[in-house]
Image (cartoon, rainbow, N blue to C red):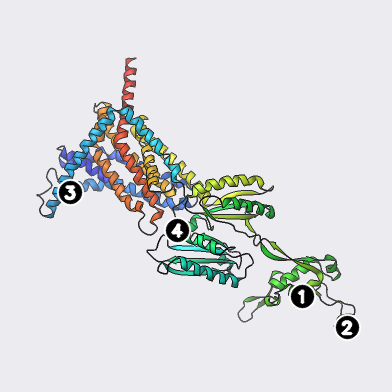
Amino acid sequence: MLVDDATVTIENIERHLHLGTNLHDAILEGAGEIAVPAFVSTLCICIVFVPMFFLTGVARYLFVPMAEAVIFAMLASYFFSRTLIPTLAMVLMRAGRHGRPPRGILARFARFQAGFEHGFESVRTRYRALLSAAIAHRRRFAAAFLLACVASTGLFAVAGQDFFPSVDTGEIRLHLRAPTGTRIEQTARLTDEVEARVRSVIPANQMAGMLDNIGVPVSGINLTYDSSDPIGAGDADVMITLKPDHRPTATYVTQLRNVLNRDFPGVSFAFLPADIVSQILNFGLPAPIDIQIVGNKLDANRAVANRLLAQLRSVRGLVDARIQQPGDAPAINVDVDRTKAIQAGLQQRDVSQNLLIALSGSSQTSPNFWLNPSNGVSYPVLVQTPQYEVDSLQSLANIPMPAAAPSPQTPAGGPAAGTPAQNLLGTLGTFSRGQEQAVVSHYNVQPVLDIFASVQDRDLGGVTADVTKLVDAARADLPPGSSIVLRGQVQAMHQSFAGLLSGLVLAIALVYLLMVVNFQSWTDPLVIVSGLPASLAGIAWMLFVTNTTLSVPALTGTILCIGIATANSILVVNTARELIAAGAPPWQAALDAGFSRFRPVLMTALAMLIGMLPMALGLGDGGEQNAPLGRAVIGGLAFGTLSTLLFVPVVFGFAHAWLDRRRDAAAAR
């Protein structure tokens, strides 16, 4: 794009030189003729990026810097094409023969250039014949062209939708969850077995390393950096790093997902986003799909979640579906006999506090600190029963329960006669085993259950459509006061798509209004905009052929392509308007404008296509992220250039022939 203005300027100066104009006048006339249309073309490219400044969320931070870079670069490009390029043309170009005849290698290059020019003129001649045929059969050509464009846009539904394309960073994050209540040493042994199974799937020459993180981090700060949301000693994260030139990471993920679920029944496995971009797009969640059941009635909500989870597992392309908060954590229920507790001088609150002190420490109920006089630092002091002394129900029953009031004593300091011995927990209540919520998560203060799921071998939009149907059906089973919300990457994708699509419509409207102001006409801007359906058709075909889903980068490429295609059409329409002003009939003006602007339109389009080719191929680390943008631009610009050279002149002829008939009819009245 940065060379477009300079290319058009040099080509127009060269055209005037071939017409016999002297160098000074050729530069003034050639640069002056296209000053206004080139400025409008540049503004069109800049304007299409303005709606990106109204994006919200992650998409804003990803694409606003790109929009700013393109806008400022295009304005600078136009400035130098009006100042530096004509000056350099005056210094370096010559009228007629450019210096002495070339020799040696330059002579070969000159012969190649002469042959290329001869071939290019042959292509121009064939193009003129093709455009003449299109004008001769204009009604059938226009109808067939529009029908093909409209039909091609149906391929967008086949392409699928994704927020962003996945990037192969050579990293795999595996999260495993043993049955709730598993001790950490058992989880460690299980993790070793999983590691051995992973090494049997991934060859040693492909693996660079493997790192485990078992259990819950002690520090709450560290926990905030862990997107796997571990809840206990039964959780473990396994980070696998592959060597360069490895096989596709997705292949290993698919194999591991099948093998691990088969060989380790009862263990839950989930593959989490490993690269930083996917983690950001998930907003720190461990999966792109997050179905939240919000409400205070946890038991009823869990029943709905279990039924919904069973239905979700039948959705094609949905994998790693699980409820994040287990409801089967083993628990010991203590049923306190209030009568016995009161007789012992205890209330139920006293029993609870004593039990909490014994199991968790006195810092929970009676925080105490010791001030070190030597350094002035306060240290917490607490008491707690050692874990090895509370390893059975009998030892739990032997926990002493001192009364809140002091026991009667004799003058010697011993217990008074008839005073019962210190109470034990087992004498005040009964014990029973049960299950409870392992963890209670909250969203906006309310308790919430999260159903996380990922996508494999299918686009996120298609999976979301099926999930939404099941979620809508599950709402009827919710208890009063509860709700189901679909969050995660899905929510951000829908918001970004809505913002970009509305931005696309706004960009077209802004470009149209700009051209209305420039041309002082409502008709010619419509002629220019009429070529945009072909660009959309080209984007649809390119995404379909390359098996690329419609994503935020692809929509960004669509917006960019609209600006470029509009800029090329402006050159053709502006030339045709000048020919009509000189007295040419509409159809002849359309033919001559397309023929005279064939070279600059083709040159700018080819420059953009070649420049976007490395991006479209996804070369380099992380190249998959921007590949949809390059492919969208290439497909849209290829079809848009074809529309600019064939369809736009035909529409221009139709429009101005209709205007002539209106003027003739008005004059006749």
Report whether residue 86 is seen.
yes
The reply, left or right, for residue 504 in relation to residue 605 is right
Upstream in the sequence, badge 1 or badge 2?
Answer: 1
Q: In front here: 201 or 622?
A: 201
204 lies above or below 68: below
> Sequence-wise, which precedes: disc 3 or disc 1?
3
Amino acid carrying label 2: it is Pro
Front tag of 3 and 1 = 1
Say which mark, if any, is on residue 366.
none
Q: Residues within 10 Å of mark 2 (few under 14, many from 20)?
A: few
Sequence-earlier tag: 4 or 1: 4
Residue 365 lies in what quarter of the image?
Answer: bottom right
Q: Which mark is residue 91?
A: 3
For badge 1, the amino acid type reads: Asn
Query: Quick check: can you spot residue 27?
Result: no
Give how far across and how far down residue 630 sits, in percent: 36, 49
What separation in Å lies between label 4 and label 2 (alpha carbons)? 80 Å
- Residue at the spot of label 1: 398
Residue 315 in the image: x percent, y percent? Answer: 54, 50
Q: Which residue is mark 2?
A: 411
Which type of secondary structure does the marked residue at label 4 adopt? helix
Identify the residue under disc 4. 250
The residue mark sitting in front, 1 or 2, is: 1
Residue extending farthest to the top is 669
Mark positioned earlier in the residue sequence (4 or 3): 3
Residue at point 60% right, 45% down? 472
Q: Mark 2 and mark 1 in contact (Cβ < 8 Å)?
A: no
Q: Residue drawn 49% across and 50% down?
A: 460
Inter-mark Cα distance, 1 to 2: 29 Å
Q: Position of residue 623 (x, y in %)?
A: 38, 56
**Placement of 37 over or under 470, stated as above or below:** above
